Amino acid sequence: MSDSDLLREIAADVLTGATSENDPTVVPDVWPQMCELEWPLIGVAEEDGGAGGTLNDLLVLVAATGEHTVSAPLAETALAHRLLPPTGAAPETEPEAIATVALPSPGRPCHYRETPEGLLLDGHVERVPWARHADRVLVVLDRHVAVVTTRAAGWQVATGENLAGEPRDTVTFTRCTVPWADVVESPLAPDAVRRHATVLRSAQLLGALRAAVRMTTEHAGVREQFGRPLRAFQAVSAMITEAAGRLAGAESAVWAAANRLDHPDAEVDVAAARVWTGEAAGEVARLAHQVHGAMGITREHSLHHATRRLWSWRAEWGTAHECGDRLGATVLHGGADELRRLLTASEPGRNDL
């Protein structure tokens, strides 16, 4: 059994039976157990206060939360730890503390200036995951990561939710002074932070795609019409096959992006993975609800736990449209030779997600 297989088994034990429906006003019950197992610290070196392991190990667990339709601030807190290990400049926090990352929109940056006391922030960042519950909000700036905590005055959170019922809040800074003790040099450039965030959210999408395809396949095997299971009908079989193909493509795309984050073509690989998973999310959700028919339309049906996450996550931390624009610009800039090189590039290894 591989390490990834073992992680998937552990994740299934922890997440099976956890609440799928969300109450954005509370932290999920499964979060303390995830922290006890040090999931948010996986991928951070032990000498930096982390749990060791690799990014792929973390992505296996992130994908599992999507597959078991459990919402928890794992991807967000893990990304924060990759930017600022526990032994960094931020104040010590409780083991179960939630951290999140505020990624200002490229068109609406968060303005700051240096003062003797620290960085003075002005502006707002929309759709910050889990901000209302976070002990630390890491604001990604040009050269710095500003770790905003409760001891920093001049910031407030306006609550909001996505379609899946997860907290997606707006954080506003009004002459908010972040002490120099809570400011660190960013280990990653802002574009690299966005790539990491996109891969994490793509892994969640991958998990939710697995859940939707599994539920659809199982439903078609047990639901009968005219004395035959649904899967015996050619049209239904074709829809299931198409959904499975979309899933297989997403698995390959996310794996390639995760394994090439440090590669010169990382932007292309991550954008391609986001385009594939984003489009797969819409198509798989459509096909799944078609196969389920009226049963899949009711909000209480378990299929909705997967598809609401698909519809929500495909619009976060990089959309398929935005990434498609970047891919198109890359091809136009590089011309035919660059397109040929990108299409024929390959990496050895296997899919561990």
Image: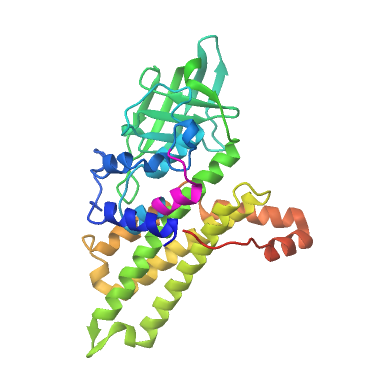
Asked which quadrant contains residue 5, the reply is: bottom left
Please, is residue 236 above or below residue 226 in the view?
above
Asked which quadrant contains residue 281, the reply is: bottom left
Quick check: can you spot residue 185?
A: yes
Q: Is residue 16 left or right of residue 329?
A: left
Please, is residue 350 above or below residue 225 in the view?
above
Please, is residue 166 above or below residue 177 in the view?
below
Q: Name the spot of residue 187 as percent of width and height, x first.
A: 57, 32
Quick check: can you spot residue 314?
A: no
Q: Residue at x 36, y 81 (%)?
A: 236
Residue range of the region highlighted in magenta in the rendering = 51-61
Please check the rendered image and state whether residue 324 is part of the magenta-colored stretch, yes or no: no
Q: Name the spot of residue 24 as percent of width and height, x first.
A: 27, 41
Please check the rendered image and state whether residue 55 is part of the magenta-colored stretch, yes or no: yes
Q: Which residue sits furthest top?
A: 116
Q: Residue at x 49, y 25 (%)?
A: 146
Image quadrant where one finds the N terminus? bottom left
Q: Name the spot of residue 302 as percent of width and height, x first.
A: 25, 62
Please, is residue 163 above or below residue 295 in the view?
above
Q: Name the spot of residue 332 as percent of width and height, x first.
A: 73, 56
Q: Is residue 135 left or right of residue 185?
A: left
Q: Residue at x 50, y 52 (%)?
A: 319
